Image (cartoon, helix red, strand yellow):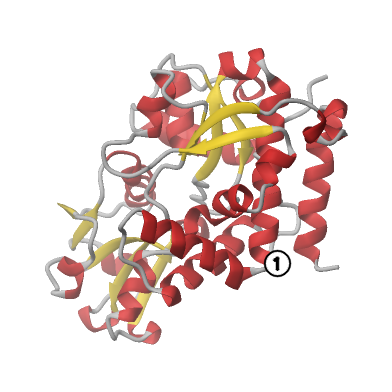
Amino acid sequence: MAVWTRIFTVVFLFLSFLDPAAMARAEEGPLKRARFLPQWSPQAQFAGYYVAFHKGVYKHHGIDLYIQNGGPGHSPREYLEKGKTDFATLWLATGIEMRAQGVPVVNMAQILQRSALMLVAKKARGIETVADIDGRKIGLWGAVFQVQPRAFFRKFNLQVTVVPQSRSVDLFLRDGVAVASAMWYNEYHTILSSGIDADELTTFFFHDYGLNYPEDGLYALEATWQEDPALCRAFARASLEGWRHAFDHPEEAVDIVMAEMERAHIPATRVHQRWMLDRMKDLMIPADDPDRAPGLLIPADYERVAQGLQALDLIDGIPDFSSFYQACPHD
């Protein structure tokens, strides 16, 4: 059995231990209806959830799940706050910020264990080290996407000119900025697909610089958790099971993702979606860190992200970890 398969099994059993009644087959009782909103449009970033839906995993765990359309105009933060969804994916930084600002969200499972956010530069522009970034124009996305870059600039005393970055990397490709923001599983591959070789690029992964702010986690309002913790744990377990199946059967998973993208009228290439799925596996189960497992929120990560938000005056105080992360056991 592969190491990552054993990890998934341990996490699955851990979540089941927290709710022994959930070990019984869910089909024995009526299905519970629930809504789930991914934070973006269908793509392999969310493959595990679509796989779990199409393979009947959620139903097996007693959930009649409706996956809502994510993307522009469908903010998971707003949907959760207004009760327009039951579950959503959020970045850890977003979840902490919401909790600190009085929106009582809880993290039920931290899916990504390593941050995918990075900066990319062309070596031809003379950028090969962190110091070479000083004085350059850098493309940044808004809001939560700027938390890590600004911590990075502060850590290395870099003075840069920030240029708003759109969803595309065209400005970077046309040398409108010297450094661009990218997600490893998405925009970085788009840059490679444009014809630039990897050895022509310098990459700065924030997690390599002590700034690991892991992104996607599963969230609900605290009221949802308190009202039906069994449903919440079942949703987390089923989602992890969907990811396990996606990694065990990647071609089938990409088939499902491509069908979802076609249904949503989103153009896609199979090669890009397969890259994204492979990178999601790398981020959920880092090969060089066996202590990490999908679903677990490590306190050190929580503190690091919270302190980063506080340093930027985005939050006044750091919420209590044991109240925020409800998948952890309590004394």
Can residue 186 be seen here?
Answer: yes
Q: How busy is the neighbourhood of tag 1: few (under 14 within 10 Å), some, or many (20 plus)?
A: few
Residue 204 appears at what percent x and percent y? 40, 65
Query: What residue is drawn where x is 87% and y is 28%?
Result: 20
Image quarter hosting the N terminus: bottom right
Nearer the observer, 137 or 235? 235
Considering depth in this image, is 150 or 91 the residue closer to the camera? 91
Q: Could you tell whether 278 is left or right of 3 in the image?
A: left
Instruction: Give the residue at mark 1.
Output: 248
Q: Residue at x 83, y 48 (%)?
A: 10
Secondary structure of the residue carrying numbered label 1: helix
User: Dividing the picture into quarters, in which one does residue 252 lie?
Assistant: bottom right
- Under mark 1, the amino acid is Asp
- x then y, percent, for residue 249: 66, 68
Camera-nearest residue between 129 and 276: 276
Instruction: Count every numbered label the image shows and give the total.
Output: 1
Quarter of the image with the C terminus is: top right
